[in-house]
Image: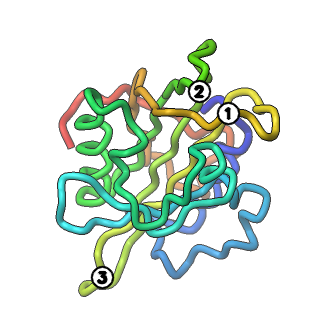
Amino acid sequence: MKSMAGLDIYAYWDDLRGKRSAPRREDIDPTKLKHHLGDLFILTDKGENTPYFRLAGTRLCDLFGQELRDRPFSELWNEANAVFPCRVARGILQHQLPVIFDVEAEDEHGAAPLAFEMLLLPLLTEMDTAPRLLGALLAERPRVNFATPIRCLSMKSSRLLRLDVAPKDRTSSTSATAAPFTGRL
């Protein structure tokens, strides 16, 4: 991971999960992530080809210039390249594996691409509840307030985050490592 925010969010999620594949949605305490809430979102499976936003932080909504709640995840992506990130997100919902994307975005002016990383972390839910995941879209460099909204994202790479190191066996939260995504979700 490239950002301290990403490491913080992952470490919190990882500590909550313990020996499970993921923490329960009810385990997430927003006050523990208060500095990152604007960048966080929750996706849910509605049985379609794309997950939908259940919640989205204010910075994320401002970044896209619209409220994202109840909107499809596919709308964030360049239409021609939306299938793969949506398939990976649906795979995370089904297989409970955390993933990180390296993405770029263009604003309305078509200036130099902006670099982001996107964390997608599964959440366990009750049997009668649609699967959910906790996500974060984190800029590699801060954007100027009131910047032009971005049009769409394009994925540069995706990697599975390793779960083979138990939280208590690690010496610091910076030991979260990513393995290249080589399989299909």
SS class, disc 2: strand
Instruction: Return the mark for residue 20.
Output: none
State which tag comes first along the sequence, 3 or 1.
3
For image coordinates 57% across by 49% down, the residue present is 136
Binning the other alpha carbons within 10 Å of mark 3 as few (below 14), some (14 to 19) or many (20 upward) gives few
Amino acid type assigned to the residue bearing label 2 in the image? Asp
In the picture, measured across the screen, residue 149 lies left or right of residue 153, that is right
Q: In the displayed image of the protein, which residue is found farthest to the front?
A: 109
Instruction: Return the mark for residue 148.
Output: 1
Circle 2 sits on which residue?
A: 107
Q: How is the image coloured?
A: rainbow
Q: Is residue 133 above or below residue 173?
A: below
Q: Quadrant of the N terminus?
A: top right
For image coordinates 53% across by 27% down, the residue present is 105
The answer to whether residue 171 is seen in the rendering is no
Q: Quadrant of the C terminus?
A: top left
User: Mark 1 and 2 residues: CB-CB less than 8 Å, in contact?
Assistant: yes
Circle 3 sits on which residue?
A: 129
The answer to whether residue 43 is seen in the rendering is yes
Where does the image place residue 173, in percent across and percent down from the top left? 68, 46
State which tag comes first along the sequence, 1 or 2.
2
Question: Distance between the Cα atoms at labels 3 and 2?
Answer: 36 Å
For the image shown, how many numbered marks are present on the structure?
3
